[in-house]
Image: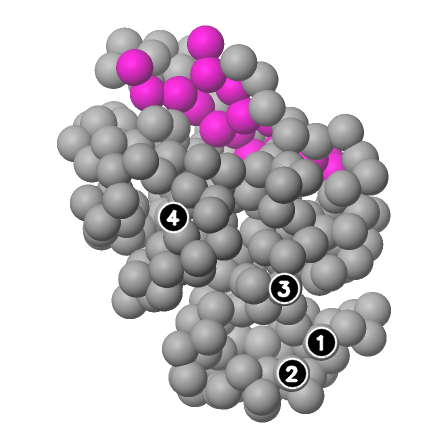
Amino acid sequence: MVLKIARRGASGYVPENTMAAFEKSLEIDCDVVEFDIHKTKDNQIIIMHDENVGKTTDGLGNIRDLTLKELKMFHEPNGESVPTLQGVFDLIKNKKKMMLDIKDQNMEREVLQSVNDNDLEENVIIDSDIPEVVKKIKKMNPKIHVFLGGVTKDNYRETIQDAKKIGAEMIKVQNILVNGDLVNEAHSHRIGVYVWGQKKYQISKRC
């Protein structure tokens, strides 16, 4: 199976992880819309890749130290405010599948509650580079599809074993690290390989 994944929305066309990127992802040929999530000081889930807001907004500070109201005062490069998880769900649900990349610990319960409230259990994939996060998500809801990232050229065998133990269906690997040994090792354990680092969208492949 090959899936085309719009990483951080259609970030090859418009600023990443913005509502414009998610709106554009509905227009292009992709199967899954991927985005990164963090938890605010007041336990709201927002969309952004980095913990520090300064990389992609005109604000300063770390997400965990800011409330949603404070974050909404900052602007993305295209003038938008920071999206919330619920806002993205409202836009995309029933149109495409979504992949949620959890960037930090201690938000699993809130994320799953939002998934359940929106009846999206069958239409989301939850991904993280943190094995403990993936393990906790799978334990809390075994029906959720989960991927495990954090693969390097030196730890891929360990990551594959971690994925197998915690029930992750795929490992997430940067394109420059993919080789036959890695793919064969993963497939020997019935673990798929999600390759990221392509232009415009990602290719997720499981043979």
Disc nearest the viewer among 3 and 2: 3
Q: Residues within 10 Å of mark 4 (few under 14, many from 20)?
A: many
Sequence-wise, the earlier of marks 4 and 2 is: 2
Q: Which residues are magenta?
A: 190-207
Sequence-wise, the earlier of marks 1 and 3 is: 1
Residue 64, horizontal then vertical, whole percent = 42, 80
The residue positioned 77% from the left and 73% from the top of the image is: 80
Residue labelled with disc 4: 128
The residue positioned 49% from the left and 54% from the top of the image is: 118
The residue positioned 22% from the left and 49% from the top of the image is: 140
Relative vertical location of residue 3 with respect to residue 59 in this rendering, above or below: above
Instruction: Give residue 81's mark.
Output: 1
Disc nearest the viewer among 4 and 2: 2
Q: Quadrant of residue 96?
A: top right
Instruction: Give residue 87's mark.
Output: 3
Give the SS element for disc 1: loop
The residue positioned 52% from the left and 19% from the top of the image is: 205
Q: Is residue 25 magenta?
A: no
Q: Say which amino acid is labelled 4.
A: Ser
Q: Marks 1 and 3, how far apart in space?
A: 11 Å
Residue labelled with disc 2: 72
Q: Residues within 10 Å of mark 1 (few under 14, many from 20)?
A: some
Sequence-wise, the earlier of marks 4 and 3 is: 3
Sequence-wise, the earlier of marks 2 and 1 is: 2
Q: Are marks 4 and 2 in contact (CB under 8 Å)?
A: no
Residue 105, horizontal then vertical, whole percent = 30, 63
